[in-house]
Image (cartoon, grey):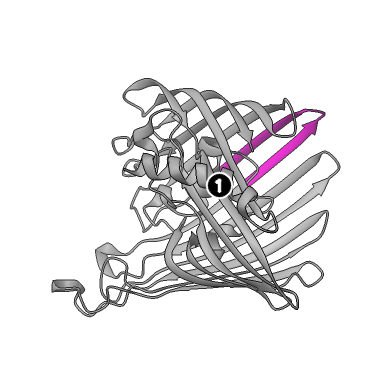
Amino acid sequence: MSNRILTAAVLAALAAPVLANDNNVTLYGRADVGVESNDDGKTSRFVVQSLASRIGFKGEENLGDGLKAIWQVESTVGFDDSANSGNFASRNSFVGLRGDFGSVIAGNTDTPFKLLAKGVDLLWNQADPLEHVTHGKASGLNVHTRQTNTVQYHSPNWDGFQFKLGYSPDENKGTYTGATAGSRRDTLSGSAEYATKTWNVGAAYDRKNEPTARGADLTAIKLIGSIKLDQLTLGAAWSKLDNGASGAAEKSVDTWTLQAAYALGKTTLRAAVAQADESAGNARDGVDFYSAQIDYALSKRSTVYAYYAAIQNEANARARFDYGSNKFTPLAGNDPRVLGVAIRHNF
């Protein structure tokens, strides 16, 4: 059913510019597919990966006096296997208003915490340490969130400074039973950033109230910074993740990442290192992450690239590569690694 809906949506998007009075509907997307050797520390596999491929359409309507209605619908596409395609509007999808005051949107979309990434998202997909380490997936404290049922405000850009706020209510409040009875699972997220043409700094906060247990709020703080020096870009990020629990269930993790990219004409060399420390004394669940990438631009929209990434899990850690359509969770203490080549086409 989802594939039929997606097909209908694509046809509608193609037809919309003809039907719209002011020709303001845009069809866009990304086809990103790789072939990789994927080793989970025990089993080595040869796989075809669809790497966050997507299709979407977006538009706006001029309402006068500087006010516009804006909307977007975006869905995951599994180029390797249609079974890996997401439901319609499975990615960032929203409707809202934009004006001199900024933007207000409502829907299913990335949190401000996740969106704060300029200069620290230099590597792509499996080689990206931000999603795997900084945002907590490697430590079981995931704040790499596309938040459902959310309302967000994005301020105007004031000479390089901008802030974003998001709130998602708990629509299931009052339905929890047992140990979770009385929980309030709403979410608050915010970010602030100052950026120039050569450097940027930013900070973000995310709070998920009682996501798994009453009285235990998952919180995250992130700091980022980057600088561009001619062909060289350097980026760094730090985060602190805490599940708010007590006793044996308590987990608190500090992470950091350093990244670099160097452009040589149509070729760009990229590398990153990241680390998440133990969640508690002698927990032995720390994670180290290393990656490298080389890409060659065939055009403004098409790029071929090769990537290598390795995860080193301490004895009780089970971090995995989480970006492709095929995911393989290792046994505790095993060290996954991937080596792949891919092509990315943006349209």
- Residue linked to disc 1: 13
Residue 112 or 1: which is nearer the viewer?
1
Residue 283, percent across and down? 33, 52
Q: Is residue 10 magenta?
A: no
Q: Is residue 334 at least partly visible in the picture?
A: no
Residue 50 seen: yes
SS label for mark 1: helix
Residue at point 55% right, 32% down? 32
Instruction: Locate residue 282 relative to residue 6 in the image: left or right.
Output: left
Indicate left or right for 40 with 16 as reference.
left
The magenta stretch spans which residues? 258-273
Q: Main secondary structure of the magenta part?
A: strand
Sort mark 1 into few (<14), some (14-19) or many (20+) by Cα contacts within 10 Å.
some
Q: Is residue 28 above or below residue 104?
A: above
Please state which amino acid type lies under the numbered disc 1.
Ala
Number of marks present in the image shown: 1
Pick the front one: 46 or 230: 46
Q: Residue drawn at (70%, 78%), measured in percent from left and top?
A: 101
| Left-right relation of 26 to 276 | right
